Amino acid sequence: MSVVAAEGLSLRFGERVLWEELSFGLGRGELLAVLGPNGTGKTSLLRILLGLLEPSGGRVRIDGCPPRERCNRIGYVPQQQVFDRDLALWGRDLVRFGLDGHRWGFGRLDRVGRERIAAALEEVAATHYADAPVGRLSGGEQQRLRVAQALVSDPVLLLADEPLLSLDLAHQRGVVDLLDARRRSAGTPVVFVTHDVNPVLHSVDRVLYLAPGRWAMGTPDEVLTSETLSGLYRTDVDVLRVRGRVVVVGTPDDQHVHHVGEGHAH
Amino acid sequence: MFTDLLAQHFVHTALWAGAVVAVVSGVIGVFVVTRGMSFAVHAISELGFTGAAGALVLGLDPVLGMLGGSLLVGLVLGLLSLRGRERDSAIGAVLAFGLGIGVLFLSLYQGYATEATNLLFGSIVGVGDGQLRNLAIVGAIVLAGVAVLYRPLLFSSVDPEIAAARGIPLRALSVGIFLLLALTTAEAIQVVGVLLVLTLVITPAAAAQRLTGRPALTLLLSVAIALASTEGGIFLSLAKPWPTSFFISALSFAAYVGARLWAAARARQKRLSPSAPRRVWAVR
């Protein structure tokens, strides 16, 4: 059975149609990359999966239930945002939010809870900076802690929204490998929103490409072709494979060409 | 003379009132500092003043007017739940207008000007038994509120985006913390006055944050600093007849400066120490 079932989703902002009749299922252990230029509703799709945004049409089921009923079992890794340097919070505390941060009251952490936090820290190799203030850690270290926070709740689904932004190559690779390892070991499906497919290319099963007003879905080899993307953009687009990297040239969105072409930000 | 004063009932009342207000302010201050709400505290206290001035004009209890003014502004700011620059300018606009109304109310007020001065600069020694009881009740409400909201409040202060993804109602929480803050502000005004509320609601928490990296410990240290400043300030004002508010603000500021110096010294020591663990990032 699919963990995620999206049926006939559409998203409109006023007159503007971002996508229509978007249907897909996501089974255990699958990694779906959501690609496309800015303003095509990539983040909105994640917000719909989280139950934070109602689609204009269609419906989503996570594990057979509406997303809101499952939101405590969805691990979410957002873009890296810098914490205040003086924030009184250790890495361990940040991970704990994933376990019981949504519950009322002070709450006491029992032995099982402490062990789960320790295991999540171990899983992302963050144990040696778990007892440091998060504001003093590097962007890559903070992002690892966010992955641990997403994993500690034993999620049925992992959602990541541009989690590699502003990370250098080694850290990008590290975060992708963590999510990849989890879906292989626990079968947790992953939806990965990114403007650059290259860091995830070696792990991705399927690609959802959102272009203005249209979308395409399939394996990377099916979607990331000159033919498919030219059809999506309704103009001549070339997809090149250079040394195992995908480079897209000729999309109407210049910035997008730059990003997919150049890959990483640093 | 000093020991004579210590035996006085009004001094005991003042010490108890100071303790209640210090505990509540120290607790709420931690969330105010984490969420970057310092300017909002200022606005809420100044509009508490407007409410009190309005109550004076109407011949009502100024404390009730102050509570009403603070709660109204807290509710509005909480519902707006604005962020960043927009929040600052919106608060500034509301604050300026509210203070203008306060000035009008004061000019209309025909009674003693001491009432207004007490509101602005505090009058801890004027606290009566009934007022102390009310302070304790309101303080208990604030502490209970913080206890219930603690974990989601901390989570959403640190990482609102993920907190929302986990189903935490951000707007309701924002209204909740602003209302608790309004109650706290109305309490603190009675001790240190409108203009010095920040000395109890911001300074101790800001100092505590420099001293520790753990949320629960920050809370305890913030309360301890607020308590020491308030009670110390009251004692000092008994020994030397300067305003209590001055002593309280001087002590809490001293704690803040001390905490910064201590944190800076500790950071330097860590850098110099060769045994400090180097963080290595495993590339897999």
Image (cartoon, coloured by chain):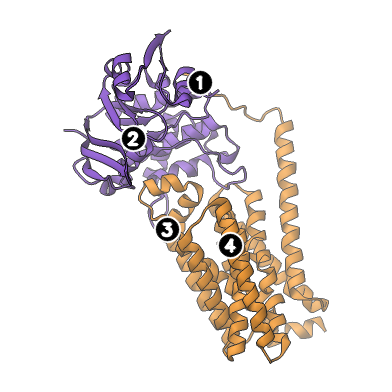
Chain colours: A purple, B orange
Which residue matches tag 4? B91
Q: Earlier in the sequence, mark 3 or mark 4?
A: 4
Which residue matches tag 2? A158
**Residue displayed at 37% across by 14% down:** A239
* Badge 3 vs badge 2, beta-carbon distance below 8 Å: no
Q: Earlier in the sequence, mark 1 or mark 2?
A: 2
Kindly report the distance in space between the C-alpha atoms of the residues bearing marks 3 and 1.
Answer: 38 Å
SS for dot 2: strand
Q: Nearer the viewer, mark 3 or mark 4?
A: 4
Q: Nearer the viewer, residue B241 or B64?
A: B64
Which residue matches tag 1? A170
Q: Amino acid at mark 4?
A: Ile
Q: Amino acid at mark 3?
A: Arg
**Residue displayed at 75% across by 64% down:** B251
SS for dot 3: helix
Kindly report the distance in space between the C-alpha atoms of the residues bearing marks 1 and 4.
Answer: 43 Å
Q: In the shown orientation, is residue A169 left or right of residue B222?
A: left
Image x and y of residue A41, in percent: 35, 37
Q: Nearer the viewer, residue A24 or A27?
A: A24
- Mark 4 falls within which chain? B
- Mark 3 falls within which chain? B
